[in-house]
Image: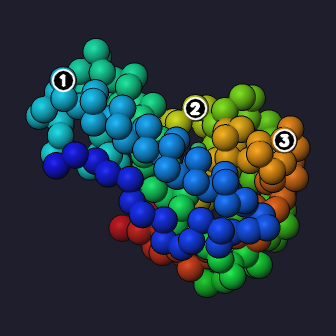
Amino acid sequence: MAHEVPALPYDYAALEPYIDTQTMHLHHDKHHQAYVTNLNAALEKAPELQKLSAEDLIKGLENVPEAIRGAVRNNGGGHVNHSMFWKIMGPNAGGDPNGAIADAIKSTFGDVNAFKEKFNDAGLKQFGSGWAWLVRDQGGKLQVVSSANQDNPLSQGFYPIMGNDVWEHAYYLKYQNRRADYLKEWWNVVNWAEVNKRFQDSQK
Ligand code: MN3
């Protein structure tokens, strides 16, 4: 069964004014779709991998034939990253984290603001395209990391709890070169219920 772009779980305009409607259309319908189209095209050359989830593909890149490994890394990563991204955002969201992730953030980073600052800094300092992440490492500790391109922390043995897309396609129409402003405003759309769910899943 071919990979598919999941439908947005809310309206394209739902994240206004922080993320504009046109960006959501282009980002979801064009960019995410392109990753999925290219992933499916690459997997035509390795039909035995077509039954694997995109997560399993990027967790085990060493098992992907070299001829398509780059395509799977970039496009499989793009598919996994964006499938998470749409869900960890939402309307009427934002504010301070709650539940177990709030406690874990406070005990790891001191307080929520220190965490947000570290996360924003990772996004700001990522040179070129990439992502800022909150991950759970194999020892169970939370870490803030960044990655280039569409690389996903799963490929490094981390569980991605939340991530923000700092590719220019994610913010340029509204924020132009002001990536720092985008990073700051993005917290207004974070769906902490979904982040808590991912934090739970990270401990399985
Ligand atoms: Mn993107």
Query: Left of 177 or right of it: where is 161?
Result: left
Which residue: 78% across, 64% down?
A: 18
Of pointers 3 and 1, the one earlier in the residue sequence = 1
Q: CA distance from mark 3 to mark 1?
A: 39 Å
Which residue: 58% across, 32% down?
A: 149
User: As displayed, is residue 197 above or below residue 130?
Assistant: below
Which residue: 27% across, 30% down?
A: 41
Mark on residue 45?
1
Residue denoted by label 3:
176
Mark on residue 73?
none
Provide residue 62's location: percent of width, then percent of height: 30, 27
Q: Residues within 10 Å of mark 1 (few under 14, many from 20)?
A: few
Using the rendered image of the protein, determine whether residue 123 is visible from the camera's viewpoint.
no
Q: Residues within 10 Å of mark 3 (few under 14, many from 20)?
A: few
Provide residue 138's location: percent of width, then percent of height: 46, 52
- Residue ranking furthest to the left: 48
Location of residue 195 by image quarter: bottom right
Which element type, helix, strand or loop, lies under badge 1? Answer: loop
Residue denoted by label 2:
149
Q: Nearer the viewer, mark 2 or mark 1?
A: 1
Of pointers 3 and 2, the one earlier in the residue sequence = 2
Q: Say what amino acid the circle numbered 2 marks.
A: Asn
